[in-house]
Image: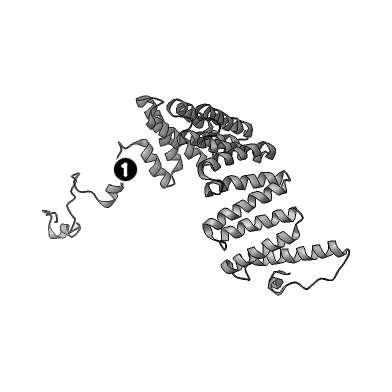
Amino acid sequence: MTQETSATARQHSRHKRHEPVINTSQESKTYYQAETVEFDADPAKMAQLFLEQGRCADAERLFLSALDEKLERKGEEHPDTEKCLEDIVVFYMNMGRYQNAEEYAETLLRVRSLTTSPTDPAYAKTVDQLANVYEQTGKPHQAEAIYRFLMTLQEELVGSYDYAIVFALHRLGECYKKQQDFAAALPLYERSLTIEEACFGPFAIETNGTLTELALCYGALGDTEKTIAILKRQVTIMESIHGPSGLSVASCLSKLAEAFEQADDQDAAEAHYWRVIQIYEAGYGMNSATVQTIYRKIDMMKREKARLTQGGFVAVAPITQNAMLGVW
């Protein structure tokens, strides 16, 4: 459809001869109009859109505007207000602006203390966010205190051996590990394992994460006997899931071999390293860097064993052919 004009031919030549009639009604929208955000849209939704476009300053302004609007209209304890607070906390944390996030994370935790149970995952998530903010702003002891506070609340509500408190036990244990206080972390992980065993059984995959932490703690404290026992159990769990030749099994076997090395049981360590090689060769090939590293380790163990048993400089068998690619 074109517009008719009363201009002469000379004048008409200066016009767009096929200029379309623009329909200004709301019924027909162009592609770009459909993508445009309405001015009366929720500021929080507009903030998310700006964030996707990389307009971080505009997104921040709208996140704060949305919070002010929700506080004024619905009050501090309304779910929509909680959502706005959480959006701001996540925004500042993702931007690395932890000092800005601290005030809002503390407010969010205070609000959720009034609206949710300490065993609610949303409450635990908020505690985790605030503890992360404290750690990033150089306040590790406040992070430890807030995890201890969460654990105390949950213990008062459900007891000391309910599965709900495993999260708090693990997070508090991580705080102690970061401080290199493995003796303080150990009983927390041991209690966590007791709870998980009661819920899922001693060889369930749900216990594997706690077993890993226990092996680290026992190893740091020099208790190689318990470290080896834990790692053997992990191997059994991984074999039940992935089979005896699974790559995850090889990873556990490698840790177990290292534990035997620390316990000065070189024969057991070598036997486990050979099994690791068999699995990794099948998965990655004989000439992979991982396999060659283990070959070199075995050769070094043999040389050290010969030196200790015979004393001084001794002639040993040449390096295995499979390990030649790893020798420089």
> Could you tell me which quadrant the N terminus lies in?
bottom left
Q: Position of residue 225 (x, y in %)?
A: 71, 48
Q: Position of residue 178 (x, y in %)?
A: 65, 40
Between residue 155 and residue 36, name the one nearer to us: 155
Rendered position, 209 above or below 305: above
Would residue 110 be visible to someone looking at this image?
Answer: yes
In percent of the image, x 38 and y 44: which residue is there?
A: 49
Would residue 100 be visible to someone looking at this image?
Answer: no
Q: Residues within 10 Å of mark 1 (few under 14, many from 20)?
A: few
Rendered position, 186 above or below 271: above
Rendered position, 275 above or below 116: below
In percent of the image, x 74 and y 56: which residue is there?
A: 261
Residue at the far right: name it.
312
> In the figure, is residue 157 to the left or right of 265?
left
Q: Which residue is mark 1?
A: 37
Residue at the far bottom: name it.
321
Q: Position of residue 240 (x, y in %)?
A: 54, 56
Q: Secondary structure at mark 1?
A: loop
- Tag 1: amino acid: Val
Between residue 278 and residue 86, name the one nearer to us: 278
> Could you tell me which quadrant the C terminus lies in?
bottom right
Q: Position of residue 280 (x, y in %)?
A: 60, 65
Rendered position, 199 above or below 159: below
> In the figure, is residue 30 to the left or right of 183?
left
Residue 25: which quarter of the image?
top left
In percent of the image, x 70 and y 56: which residue is there?
A: 258
Residue 256: which quarter of the image?
bottom right
Between residue 224 and residue 292, name the one nearer to us: 224
In percent of the image, x 44 and y 46: which residue is there?
A: 54
